[in-house]
Amino acid sequence: MAFSRFASPGAAQQRALDLAAFLALAPALWLPSGYSVGALLLVVLGLWRWPAVLRGRLAPNEPMRAWALAVLAMGLVWSMYLFEGGRLITNTLGLDRSSKYLLVLLALPAVWAQRPAAWALRWGCWVGAAGAGVLAGWQVLVQHLERAEGYTNAIQFGNLSLLLALWSGIWAMQASRRHERLFGGLAAVLGIAASVLSGSRGGWVTLPVLLVVLVWLIRPPAGGIKGHRGLRALGAALLACLLLAVLPPVQQRAHEAAQELLQRPAPEKSNTATGSRLAFWMHAWRLGVAHPWLGAGQRGYEQSQLAAVARQEMPSMSVHFNHAHNEWLDMFAKRGLLGVCGLVMFYAVPGFLCGRRLRRGGREPLENAAAASHGYDGQAVDEERHAAALCGLVTVLGYLGFGMTQVMFAHNNGNLMYLLPMTLWLAVCWPAASACGAFRTPIPR
């Protein structure tokens, strides 16, 4: 891995962008707030570009404009209840969260003019997934923690490790060198191991679905077997189910869930992980129905939860949690249907853009000509864009699956590990015309 030298005036900015992309992914889970360095560098690069934006010399293309609007809309949703009870909410459920979306908006011009290099994304995912696996093994085998939790909590760590593993697998399939494919495959295995050691059941339920999508849409390597992708996808999902079923941590957590559901009295009134989730979901639904348009806000949610515990309608452990453990019900309870619409847009826009890129399949004539004029292999560029689009689609589907039993956006890492990678995936699969010179695969001479 080495930085290439360019004669173009933007070479320094390009190297800085590549470094920011790498740092947003590589240390994300095995360092405390590891993505922060890459995020900060992206913001600095974006601010550097904003004067050109204000002068009208730099503007996003249509896909990146749609993503910017989705980020803005979601940021406004999080800002709905910044003031509650006459005071400014500054913690992670208030100003701290909505400010992250503003910072990402400030960073977006960094990728409007230039495209992050594929090597930065590829190695960022690989180092990130491998680091998560090593950290999980250390925490469970050496520190003897019951569940690997990284520097966050076990659920967030397990789900995000799983995403890093899948991204690593996608980029490993796209890599042209054998040693890179081997390292990428090892990184994917370590990322999945981190998910298993975290004991996060929501990720395991989502994994077979994500594997079907991944194997169905991924392009086989040159000379690989083509066709029968439906059978391959089904086989991959069944293999994942079988492997998970025989792993002791998975068996233990599955047994716990079954026992909790069979408890008497009703499981939703017991202080268990499964029972408390049932109670959270029912309470959030009732609160959303009572405040359907704008929700009850964070403060209203917490107050109603305390009252429900006092009435013995929820288990006592509920007071230790400030969200409903379901992304959609939590949004409905706190920000009503308006918030739900914002969440739909936040998922649908990048999902549609990545799906659109995957359906096109071939290279765009303009971008292909631009790549060729800079001495780069158009076929390799197309494969990179396909890999980035598939990473983006897996991100959306992964968050949708994880959000059934967890509120990923209730946590700082859940927000930034969606915002930052999605921005990078979209910047690669929908680059501006001026970004075509950032391609990194020279045409063989």
Image (tube, rainbow, N blue to C red):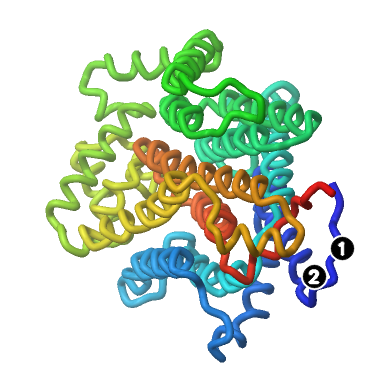
Mark 1: secondary structure: loop
Crowding at label 1, few (<14), some or many (≥20) Cα neighbours within 10 Å?
Answer: few
Task: Using the rendered view, name the quadrant where residue 46 is placed.
Answer: bottom right
Please name the residue that numbered disc 1 is placed on: 5
> Is residue 144 shown above or below 39?
above
Disc 1 to disc 2, how far (Cα)?
Answer: 7 Å
Where is residue 373? Give x, y as percent: 71, 64
- Which quarter of the picture shows residue 20? bottom right
Q: Is mark 2 on a helix, strand or loop?
A: helix
Disc 1 vs disc 2: Cβ atoms closer than 8 Å? yes
At 18% from the left edge and 41% from the top edge, which residue is drawn?
Answer: 311
Residue identified by numbered label 2: 11
Residue at left offset 32%, top offset 33%: 276
Image coords of residue 291 (percent x, y): 15, 59
Q: Residue at image x 57%, y 34%?
A: 166
Q: Measuring from the top left, give residue 404's x and y in whole percent.
A: 34, 37
